[in-house]
Image (tube, rainbow, N blue to C red):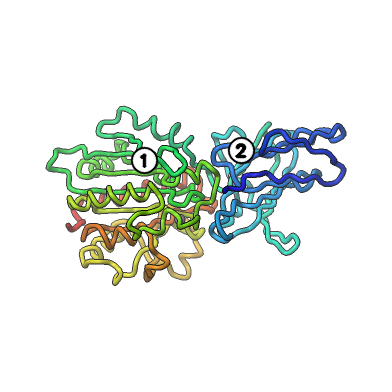
C-alpha cells in the first residue's frame, strides 16, 4: 500500500513533537518560539512524497519523492504544504535528485496561482545528491510541488466549466477507477453536416501520474479546440475528438508517481486480452469500435517530462508500422507540424513550440504501450504517437504549455482540414 506518512525529525534545541493527525506532525515545545507552529503535510489530494524537517535555522526541509516501485523513473512525484513559517523567513529545500529531477520547482501561496522557484544547486549529503533550492517566504502558507499540479481540482474548476453549453461538446463519466474514482472524458462531436464527419481523433494524458505537464498541454489544447480560432473551427467541422485529461486518476489524487506501478502501469500491458486497469479496458473497447467504423485516424498519448529541451514524439521506426499509409500519414503530419529529428545541437536548446521526434525500434516485451497497440491493432491509416511534453524547463509554465498546445492543435487542424490525411 502507499506510504503516505510524513517523516519529521527534530534537530538542535527543539525537543518535543506532537502528533496533530495520523499523517501530520508539528512542533509544540514551549521554547521554540516562532518555529513552534511549523507543520508539513502531504495529506491532501495530489500530495505525496516524504517530507522531513531537518533543521530549524535556517529552516531546511528534505524531500524524498514518492517511490512507486524501484526508484529511477518510478520515484519522481512530490507535493507538500508548509504552514507556520514567518514572512521573510528563508526556507531551504533539499530535494533528493532522482532520474527526472527539476532545477526549479513550483510554489503557491493560495494553491491556485503557481510560480517557479529560483534554480537550485546540486549538493551532496552523505553520498546522496540533492537539488538545493532557497526560497524566501512571502505568505502564511506555502505549497511546493515537483511540477505545476494538475489534479481533479484543476480539471473540475478550470476546464469542465468552460465546456458547459458549448454545442456538440459533452463531458461524460468514462469509467470507475480501481479505487472507485470517476474518470472523466470529453467528447467533441463534429460540428459540420453529417457528411462532413470524416475523422476520429483520440487524445489522452496522464497514463503516468507524475507527468502533470501532459495534462496541462491537453487542457490548453481542449480550450483551443473549442475556441473561435479559424483552424479550430475547421477541424471541429470534420472530426470527432475524444479527450481523456487524466487517465490514472487514482495515482494523481493519491500523490503517487504512477510510472512502473505493479503489475504494470497504464502505458504497459496493452496487448493483454484484459488489462489490469479498468481505464485501459474501456479505452481499448472504444478504440476498437472507432476502428471498426474506420473512424480512428490519430491517437496521441501525452506524456512527459521530455528531455529538458523540446517537446518530442517517441515513435516506432518505420518498419514497425503496419502499413505504408501509416508511414506516409505520419511523415506528412510531421511535415505540417515542422517536427524534426534531434541532432547534437538541437538537443542543447529549449523551446515549447519546436517539435521533434525520436524513432525507436520496438520490442514487445518492453514497449507494450498504448501507442504500439494502436498502431498494430486499429486502422491501416492511424497515426499513433506518444508525445513527451516539455516538462522541467524554465519555459514549462502555464504560458509555455499553452504555446505547445496551440502549436500542436494548429498542425492537427491543417493536416486534416487541408486534405493531407490518406484513408
Ligand atoms: Zn510517461
Q: Which residue is mark 2?
A: 43
Ligand 1 has an atom within 8 Å of the beta carbon of the residue at disc 2: no
Q: Residue furthest left?
A: 195
Left/right placement of residue 64 relative to residue 315 reads right
Residue in view at x 40 percent, y 50 percent: 277
Question: Which of the 4 image quadrants contains residue 91?
Answer: top right
> 100 or 234, which is in the foreground?
100
Q: Is residue 88 visible?
A: no
Q: Quadrant of ligand 1?
A: bottom left
Earlier sequence position, callout 2 versus callout 1: 2
Quick one: which residue is furthest to the top in this view?
165
Q: Is residue 258 left or right of residue 286?
A: right
Camera sees residue 114? yes
In the rendered image, residue 302, in percent from the top left (x then y), is placed at 40, 52
Rendered residue at 34%/43% (across/down): 243
Tag in front: 2 or 1? 1
For the residue pair 344 and 260, the one nearer the viewer reads as 260
Gap between marks 2 and 1 measured at Cα: 25 Å
Q: Is residue 376 left or right of residue 48?
A: left
Q: Secondary structure at mark 2?
A: loop
Q: Position of residue 337 (x, y in %)?
A: 32, 56
Q: Nearer the viewer, residue 21 or 331?
A: 21
Residue at the image position 42 percent from the left and 42 percent from the top? 177
Label 1, on which residue? 175
Amino acid at each position: 500500500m502507499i506510504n503516505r506518512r510524513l517523516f519529521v525529525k527534530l534537530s538542535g534545541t527543539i525537543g518535543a513533537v506532537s502528533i496533530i493527525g495520523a499523517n501530520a506532525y508539528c512542533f509544540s515545545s514551549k521554547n521554540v518560539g516562532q518555529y513552534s507552529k511549523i507543520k508539513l503535510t502531504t495529506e491532501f489530494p495530489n500530495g505525496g512524497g516524504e517530507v522531513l524537517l531537518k533543521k530549524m535555522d535556517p529552516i531546511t526541509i528534505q524531500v524524498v519523492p514518492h517511490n512507486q516501485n524501484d526508484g529511477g523513473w518510478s520515484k519522481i512525484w512530490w507535493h507538500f504544504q508548509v504552514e507556520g513559517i514567518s514572512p521573510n523567513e528563508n526556507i531551504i529545500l533539499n530535494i533528493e535528485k532522482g532520474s527526472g529531477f527539476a532545477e526549479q520547482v513550483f510554489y503557491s501561496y493560495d494553491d491556485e496561482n503557481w510560480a517557479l522557484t529560483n534554480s537550485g544547486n546540486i549538493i551532496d549529503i552523505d553520498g546522496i545528491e540533492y537539488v538545493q533550492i532557497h526560497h524566501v517566504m512571502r505568505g502564511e502558507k506555502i505549497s511546493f510541488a515537483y511540477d505545476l499540479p494538475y489534479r481533479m481540482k484543476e480539471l473540475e474548476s478550470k476546464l469542465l466549466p468552460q465546456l458547459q453549453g458549448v454545442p456538440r461538446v459533452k463531458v461524460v463519466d468514462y469509467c470507475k477507477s480501481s479505487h472507485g474514482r470517476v474518470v472523466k472524458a470529453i467528447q467533441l462531436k463534429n460540428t459540420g453536416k453529417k457528411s462532413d464527419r470524416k475523422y476520429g481523433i483520440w487524445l489522452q494524458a496522464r497514463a503516468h501520474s507524475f507527468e502533470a505537464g501532459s495534462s496541462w498541454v491537453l487542457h490548453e489544447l481542449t480550450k483551443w479546440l473549442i475556441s473561435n480560432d479559424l483552424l479550430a473551427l475547421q477541424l471541429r467541422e470534420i472530426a470527432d475528438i475524444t479527450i481523456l485529461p487524466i487517465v490514472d486518476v487514482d495515482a494523481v489524487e493519491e500523490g503517487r508517481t504512477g510510472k512502473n506501478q505493479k503489475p504494470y502501469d497504464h502505458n504497459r500491458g496493452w496487448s493483454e486480452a484484459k488489462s489490469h486497469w479498468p481505464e485501459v479496458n474501456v479505452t481499448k473497447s472504444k478504440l476498437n469500435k472507432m476502428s471498426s467504423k474506420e473512424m480512428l485516424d490519430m491517437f496521441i498519448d501525452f506524456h512527459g517530462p521530455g528531455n529538458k529541451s523540446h517537446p518530442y514524439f517517441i515513435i516506432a521506426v518505420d518498419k514497425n508500422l503496419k502499413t505504408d499509409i501509416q508511414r506516409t500519414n505520419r511523415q506528412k503530419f510531421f511535415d505540417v507540424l515542422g517536427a524534426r529529428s534531434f541532432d547534437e545541437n538541437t538537443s542543447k536548446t529549449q523551446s515549447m513550440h519546436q517539435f521533434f521526434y525520436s524513432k525507436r525500434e520496438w520490442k514487445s516485451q518492453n514497449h507494450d504501450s498504448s501507442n504500439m497497440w494502436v498502431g498494430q491493432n486499429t486502422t491501416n491509416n492511424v497515426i499513433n504517437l506518444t508525445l513527451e511534453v516539455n516538462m522541467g524547463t524554465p519555459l514549462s509554465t502555464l504560458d509555455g504549455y499553452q504555446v505547445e498546445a496551440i502549436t500542436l492543435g494548429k498542425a492537427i487542424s491543417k493536416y486534416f482540414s487541408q486534405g493531407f490525411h490518406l484513408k
